[in-house]
Image (cartoon, coloured by chain):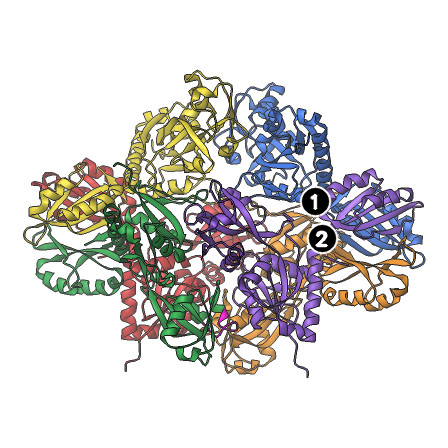
Chain colours: A red, B green, C yellow, D orange, E purple, F blue
Amino acid sequence: MNKKQVLRFGLPKGSLQDATIEKMAKAGFNISVSSRSYIPYVDDPELEIRMIRAQEISRYVEHGYLDCGITGLDWIQENGSKVHEVGEFQFSKVTRQPARWVLAVPENSPIKSVKDLEGKRIATEVVNLTRKYLRKNKVKAEVEFSWGATEVKAHELVDAIVEITETGSSLRANKLRIVETLMVSTPRLIANHTSWKDAWKRKKVETMAMLLKGALEAESKVGLKMNVARENLQNLLATLPALRNPTISNLSLEGWVAVETIIDEHVVRELIPALKSAGAEGIIEYPLNKVVY
Amino acid sequence: MNKKQVLRFGLPKGSLQDATIEKMAKAGFNISVSSRSYIPYVDDPELEIRMIRAQEISRYVEHGYLDCGITGLDWIQENGSKVHEVGEFQFSKVTRQPARWVLAVPENSPIKSVKDLEGKRIATEVVNLTRKYLRKNKVKAEVEFSWGATEVKAHELVDAIVEITETGSSLRANKLRIVETLMVSTPRLIANHTSWKDAWKRKKVETMAMLLKGALEAESKVGLKMNVARENLQNLLATLPALRNPTISNLSLEGWVAVETIIDEHVVRELIPALKSAGAEGIIEYPLNKVVY
Amino acid sequence: MNKKQVLRFGLPKGSLQDATIEKMAKAGFNISVSSRSYIPYVDDPELEIRMIRAQEISRYVEHGYLDCGITGLDWIQENGSKVHEVGEFQFSKVTRQPARWVLAVPENSPIKSVKDLEGKRIATEVVNLTRKYLRKNKVKAEVEFSWGATEVKAHELVDAIVEITETGSSLRANKLRIVETLMVSTPRLIANHTSWKDAWKRKKVETMAMLLKGALEAESKVGLKMNVARENLQNLLATLPALRNPTISNLSLEGWVAVETIIDEHVVRELIPALKSAGAEGIIEYPLNKVVY
Amino acid sequence: MNKKQVLRFGLPKGSLQDATIEKMAKAGFNISVSSRSYIPYVDDPELEIRMIRAQEISRYVEHGYLDCGITGLDWIQENGSKVHEVGEFQFSKVTRQPARWVLAVPENSPIKSVKDLEGKRIATEVVNLTRKYLRKNKVKAEVEFSWGATEVKAHELVDAIVEITETGSSLRANKLRIVETLMVSTPRLIANHTSWKDAWKRKKVETMAMLLKGALEAESKVGLKMNVARENLQNLLATLPALRNPTISNLSLEGWVAVETIIDEHVVRELIPALKSAGAEGIIEYPLNKVVY
Amino acid sequence: MNKKQVLRFGLPKGSLQDATIEKMAKAGFNISVSSRSYIPYVDDPELEIRMIRAQEISRYVEHGYLDCGITGLDWIQENGSKVHEVGEFQFSKVTRQPARWVLAVPENSPIKSVKDLEGKRIATEVVNLTRKYLRKNKVKAEVEFSWGATEVKAHELVDAIVEITETGSSLRANKLRIVETLMVSTPRLIANHTSWKDAWKRKKVETMAMLLKGALEAESKVGLKMNVARENLQNLLATLPALRNPTISNLSLEGWVAVETIIDEHVVRELIPALKSAGAEGIIEYPLNKVVY
Amino acid sequence: MNKKQVLRFGLPKGSLQDATIEKMAKAGFNISVSSRSYIPYVDDPELEIRMIRAQEISRYVEHGYLDCGITGLDWIQENGSKVHEVGEFQFSKVTRQPARWVLAVPENSPIKSVKDLEGKRIATEVVNLTRKYLRKNKVKAEVEFSWGATEVKAHELVDAIVEITETGSSLRANKLRIVETLMVSTPRLIANHTSWKDAWKRKKVETMAMLLKGALEAESKVGLKMNVARENLQNLLATLPALRNPTISNLSLEGWVAVETIIDEHVVRELIPALKSAGAEGIIEYPLNKVVY
């Protein structure tokens, strides 16, 4: 049979759309979204991209309309979708903190723990997650779906909210206090169970997972290159994070070597002073597109 | 004679302006356009930049108001300009497809080939190219200049249009069908014939062409670096595109080498899995500013 | 004592804000500014960032509300602030010219030098700098504070202005002529004198200065890598700027070496043709994040 | 007791926000929304405004957090809210057609009536309205909540959608066909049952309803004024819509009267030619702020 | 025959689009343009609107694709279109000056009249109008089509330009001098000759012309109302522009009358002081939607 | 002498610019500001407009560069400008509250009155007004010029601020408390003393003041028109604000009169219910352009 194989891939539409398309491009898949057509162009004839709200992707993957997709663990669980999880992607570069769904109340609210919610009213976008959490804590409370601007509601429309946050700064600006954390969520690549059993589709998904992981990995990593006298080499190597072996190459200048390594960008600020103390010279840091171990 | 030599260089204004200025910067020429002055600043005293519509650049190069400029082959031919073509630049990174001027009609039009245009009316921005094409096909039809929104006209104002497209997605969104392709167009660096005979100007143009080519080339290329055991080296080299010799350097670790090469970004997605199979470790991909062979 | 040490750091708000946050990120400090909170988030618990107008930073550093900050030499002197200057940062990448405060008049004004200002009226944002300059030149003139759009005033509201410029193009577009230059200003990292005596704060500031310098340095530098036959090596090295020793490593191909160096981006356009003449092959230029000598 | 009486009033946030605030201003209540504060300023100390999503207003009116609010009949019914309906407001000025929730399918879908939905999947923002409609028609189908971009889903993610439309043009542009209309919705002013029993609140709400109605009425009405000879008066009056008595005043010019009336703006285009035929002179049309019969 | 009669009406797309749609609304025809559909909605089933570039409307009216349309006299003549001119509309409200196509040159150009253009090169968007003008003046010069930014070209790319202007301020800002005026252009309502012979279409067009005229007229007119003692009436009437008879009605207060008139808005600033001197009291000015004499 | 008389008029540039130009248009003076020219076009050859920062207008009026201008009382006093005040204009339509400069501190600050500022540091844009206020209160404190974002400074950079506010909502959003009000400021039309003595200029300024006043007055006024049976007339007149005599005209319908009056828009909401009770029928409210008593 020579029918063309195609993988239907769902990406989150909306606020995450540009970032996702940029990361797909780094992984090697160039997508261009036209305002006139709801099917984006992608420069891989084996792929069909669909932009769908993060909230709905797991549902359409489960039903088989999509072979796979990228969405958050939160919405997979909120929808109770039965899908195969292929991989987890790392946290936001800026804060290096995952998204958390938290129970929040006004700063001066008497509510101190989930137990204090008995008989109260809670607004949230994740109604199922919240109800499950209340059941687990044996608390009876009314949970209502919030269409947006949930933070503002905590002050007079409801008693508490369950809302998403990274650093908590938006909650603080709204004078809200975090009571408890319901769940921590990170982006996942998920696949439909049937698609996952198809050999061609599975291989295609796994390759994409590797490339995406390589691209995302590279966002928080940098390349570091420096020269060092051979006599200071052991000293310098002790300074570098033990994680991976650096590449050491001989320089034509007698007694000197070049050391090159890949490290987490956020440790560079502590590492560079240490490297200089250890005898490194001509340190340069350069950006990466992909890192595949 | 010590009069300062200057090269007057035309760049396309409008939708391509930002991209062009960015590419010039990658080539090493920083341009800043002020809303108050029609002459952009450039950090090279030997250059004078003029921003002019792509449609008109070849005309002003031919007349000698500009020594050289960048514009599309389409407009050079539409204007019938007699200029020296210094170089051709590569296609759009996103689609890797060149711009094409195509004859298009509504999906359900009876027109199936250029021959069916006899006695019809055609709207286009490239009136001369279209007339020439009709003559070549011995078809008599009325061609009228379209001031814009040409795609919409095909449905009721005219019988067919000649329009530019890369992926055809805008035509599809307008429910138009491509009948034939009139020409494929790519950006060209062109020079005035007299300027090209001036030794200083010619050398300046050639250097700029090399730098621009190096910068554009680098946009679709990436650097790839990996470590491999010497025993797997031949295996791995067989995997790499034959195009160029990779740089192989000895690592201080006995029996291992570092392999570094420059490849087309769009093959990376197929290459990385193959390289891992061939024994590559610690593969990293990094971005390039310029590639000059 | 285990109280957490914190450094309060002022960054210029307004037109320079985005550029500064980008440079801080390159230095390794990720800042995110929320429209809801006036205290930006930074991913270093030892830092507290404040966004303050460049005009005011030196004043708040002097008073001790800030431990240190980045602002221009112009505003440090205009405010007459007594602060410790930790370091100077390089010029704008685009123009490679520092900001200058200049005395400007309409093109056809009879004023030819500062001496001609006797009894005249001058509008400027830097009232103190201007008055000091007049005193130094023994000229008596009225200086009035300009709240903005100073350039327009020169034509009828006042006799002359003192305004900032890089390339002078905005002044030219306003048909103004530069009479004299009052001062050249570059960005400085400054510290409060007391904070500077605190060992922990001083070390923190010095590390940040090194990282920022490395990041800014990298903006105008690029990496250059090429292969060359050993017999052409001396020839090629003579072509490279003498500034730093290039890294030369042996290639596995007998008789060839790889040469790698860091150079100013703006000399690349002259260097590449020369390198090719000297026998370099496979020249690639790549971007840098940081350069620390 | 003399505690200040206050009416808490909910207005729809989001796409309707600006239009609503403008209409409130026409009714005589000036509201200014600050990006920094979630409580808008209103120049009536007896009012407290809350901007809340149209979807949620009826819920908060029912619970008593709001005394009254403006929202659509659709969301009142979707939420099943038990509230007092004070008044209905007229249709959009542009289309003069009320919003309708319709069942829509792709143009070439075999679905011709609600009966054909048996066993199918439907996406909609109004899950409850849709389920009720299916029950009424004794059809069993799966209804799932759509977070947005519902129109696009009809082509491959679901079998049908229930979506809102005025003219149907957005559905047509998406190549969808309307199968049936589920409900017609217009804006309503609703009040909490308890608030409605409070004499002060009820009077305040009724006055606001009258002023809002007067302002909305005025949007689709205009004033028309003309002079006519007394002998042509009966003729002219026969031409005017019978709806209201025009105001007829004597002119100082013997035998002439001025006729002034208020009519629907959209009949003006047919009326003016008729009035001229009937002898009207100097016809002027002027805008209105409010019309209270 | 009961086939629905429809008039196909072309309106200018682009920079004039919003203003035109607003004026049509004032005339009583509400149009809403959707980004998804190229056919705008209009609340009159007898109309079909098409948005087309002003440059092209006369061509499509001539060919019969449109029954009628609004465009400038300039483009009707540039295209040499044979169409029926139904009416002319008044000038811009702001400047009260019609658009003019003028011959312009740099301030210091030696060109003083059209005669000096012999052998020169001229850039313009109206190639045919310019050539005709040169022929009339027996001047031979090269005329080339300008795709935009024509004003900038006058300084070095060509010798002169023919460009459109109202107040000349944009030309002055570009340091250009007006040499001569080629033509004055105002908006025209034009009809296809065949459509004009169709009784139904002609009546429809004439009604629309009357309503549009009434709406445009109203833009530069205002209503003025005042009270005056009968003894001062003649005095006051002498002050009012003689153009039209004011409406004079008796007040219930003995000896006083109300005077009401419609006047050009731009004379109000001179009229009001005069009216007060003549004894007018309680003068109010109010806006108009339409004025039909 | 027939030299053309011209009045040079300064209008506030920046945030108030659009509103000012709109009000000038209502007064009958159409201004169009070009981004290319710093001198706006105005359709009155006797006027020359200059757009200048509100902060600076009084200074240039005092010096005679401008004949007159519109600015706030605050900046006239801050600059200590000696100018003739021609007229005061009314408050903002939305809040009906004048701008106030207030002393503000963090909500939890111990500062309760101006007396508590002894030895403190205050940031403000109105340094002179603040110093004068402190002197009057015999308080010694340091006052420093704030370049913007003053509200944020109150929390840690200074002890108190002097800032402008209308409703106080921005201060509240920043968790600041108003301690005292320094001054209330409204817009003023001011003239240079010498210009004011010139008969022609003075008349021109007075006419403009009358027209501007008429236009501004009209913004907060509306026309109200209703029919009433003669027997209810006295009753109805008693309901209307005593401010001005309404216009009463006889209707042709025996025993009925039409009543027309001009009232403050913000009393309409209380008045309409009362008018209906008093027997008014067919009440309509219409907008005004100008009101000149």
Which residue is most to the top? C138
Q: Residue at x 34, y 51 (%)?
A: B64
Cα separation between marks 2 and 1? 16 Å
Between C70 and C186, which is closer to the camera in this rendering? C186
Magenta segment? B153-160
In the rendered structure, find residue E146 and report the number of the disc placed on it.
none
Residue F76 at x, y percent in the picture: 62, 28
| Label 1 crowd bin: few (<14), some (14–19), many (20+), radius 10 Å | few
Q: Is residue C9 above or below residue B243?
A: above
Give the chain of mark 1.
D
Between D161 and A101, which is closer to the camera in this rendering? D161
Label 1 sits on residue: D45
Q: Secondary structure at mark 2?
A: helix
Give the chain of mark 2.
D
Q: Is residue C180 magenta?
A: no
Relative to residue A143, is residue A65 drawn left or right? left
